[in-house]
Amino acid sequence: MITAETNGSGPDAHAEVERLYGTLFLIRRFEETLLDLFSAGKLAGTTHTCIGQEADAVGVVGCLDPARDVVVSNHRCHGHYLALTDDVDGLLREVMGRVGGVCGGKGGSQHLHAGNFFSNGVLGSTVPLATGMALAARERGDGGLATVFVGDGTLGQGVVYESFNIASLWGLPLLVVLEHNGYAQSTPSHLQIAGDVEARAAAFGIATERVATTDVAVVHEAAAGAVARIRESGRPYFLVVDTYRFSPHSKGDDFRDPGEIAGRRELDPLVVAGERVRAETRAAVEAAVEQRLADAVERADDAPRVGGEGVAAR
Amino acid sequence: MSVRCVQALNQGLHDVFEARDDVYLLGEDLLDPYGGAFKASQGLSTRWPERVLATPVSEASMFGIAAGFALRGYRPIVEIMFGDFVTLGFDQIVNGIAKFREMFDDQVSVPLVVRTPMGGRRGYGPTHSQSLEKLLLGVPGLTVVAPNECHDLGALLAAAVTDDAPVVFVENKLMYGRPNRRPRNGQVDEFAVVEGGGRYPALTFSGNGFSGADATVVTYGGMLPVVLEAATELILEHELFTEVVALGQLLPFDLGPVLASVGRTGALVTAEEGTLTAGVGAEIAARVQAEAWDDLRGPVRRVAARDGIVPAARSLEDEALPGVEDVMREVAAVCGSRT
């Protein structure tokens, strides 16, 4: 119940909100750094940033137990990955194609695996994958669960509903987090989604909750409730978070009204959470992140490229 | 007394369930007394109710669920009722199951087995009779195994289950009902048989005790009895001797036994039940011609189904699918004679 804590004044409450803010800021600056590296010609390929949506990753993953819970993510996965692993170097080098990347440069931006984290690039396919991981958690009986992050565009994929059906039918500890940012790539939701989003899961007998927020504390509270309920009941849960993406779908492919984006800036999760962090602490947290990223970029830049001589060097 | 192939497979499933408690079976209509549409899974749900998971009609998800389950340390077997329905799982197969190991830099393996019946000659019509193995052969990272009625079916199944690679295990529908004709003293009926090496060995047959042959026929699965019958007829009617190589493993390609046989015979015919274009035979022909050009007297020839549907009416199905005469004709052609 981070909301209660963050509204309190004890030292623990402050430490917690500062920690969450630090992760939000790390993800934001990491992805802005990636976009800068693209502009500088130091990155190739593609990337999908979650700038504006960081509260989902930090709030949800913060409720999980990295030792037994699994996170399955999608093309927009950097935030989820960093929230679970804090592996800045491994991710940066992976995206840059340098030795030391978490998947040896083979996966790149959207195909990541480390520990209990998995992401893949085809929308929808990850939901049955996470359902199978939830089945493994159930069979292992260690109280672990599988969390899968999807976006509203993925609601168009049929396998999502097959998996909802099976997860409910079999009683699987599966947390489906829908990061509803209102767009599937360039197409707004009203051209994509008919009917009621929550009802889609509810129809399968899955407990459902919807929060419209970019407040990491609110997401954290909702997710904590969902996780507790899954561990207690062993049943799936559907958590919808209405959020907003400031960044383009990928890089520069943004045709939204700039006024619409500007109008959402006051709900920037960094603004919302940052107001609760003491000014001097905030400056220190941000400076530490900036230094960490600058060092990581320097190290990655110095690391050999994977393949050829890079492989020999490894 | 030999058992029927479906019984041998069923026994093989019971054996792997007995041996390992990380093996699960997922699929449609698996529960006793039904025991799967072709009865290969009978008895499992009674003995291990907690490890036989009867699924809804959701093949596309079933592949993904099995992949997630396998990534987390289990060894699922997925039974897909008809091989034709494997198409529903292609996203998971192509973009997940077959990729994860390499894509995640060898940090993971996906040890799952997809068991599925392929093949026609039962009048099931266009969507329940196909041999779609060739669609799977273009997927790097996958292992495709296609046993025939002379294989040790239980051993191949156990090998697939303990394989750390994802395996599609193709069971021919007609094979189910036929006797499992294991070689005895190196013979199956009038054929001498040599079993190759590896997890999924090829079987090489000779109608004259490997005392010299005019051509090699490479085949697999349900085409083996068709090809063996053709081999017998070729001896009786044309005094043409063949070696028949029945592959156990289709992917990754391991053509050692084929090249060895072609080295002895100098001619090759490929025989498969799937359609001709871009088929198994096309890949084998390309590889053998590249590696054994000097051994070959002429081009490799292919026997396959015509490029079209497998019609429902038995008379039309017989016309569409390759038969004994087709094999005889192509063998005679590579031997420079006519049937």
Image: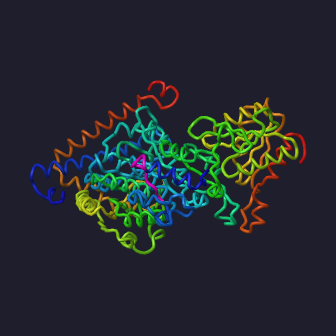
Farthest left residue in view: A10
Residue projecting furthest to the bottom: A195
- Identify which residue is drawn at 41% across, 58% down: B47
Task: Locate residue A201, reporting x and y percent.
Answer: 38, 69
Residue B319 percent across, percent down from the top left? 79, 61
Q: How is the image coloured?
A: rainbow
Q: Residue at x 80, y 37 (%)?
A: B267
Looking at the image, which is closer to me, A27 or B86? B86
Q: Total number of numbered labels?
A: 0
Q: Nearer the viewer, residue A194 or B255?
A: B255
Assign the C terminus of chain A to one quadrant of the image. top left
Residue B10 appears left or right of B334: left
- On the image, the x and y values in percent for residue B207 come to 77, 40
Task: Please give the range of residues in magenta.
Answer: B18-26
Residue B41, placed above or below residue A308: below
Q: Quadrant of the N terminus of chain A?
A: bottom left
Locate residue B162, reporting x and y percent: 48, 43
Q: Is residue A75 visible?
A: no
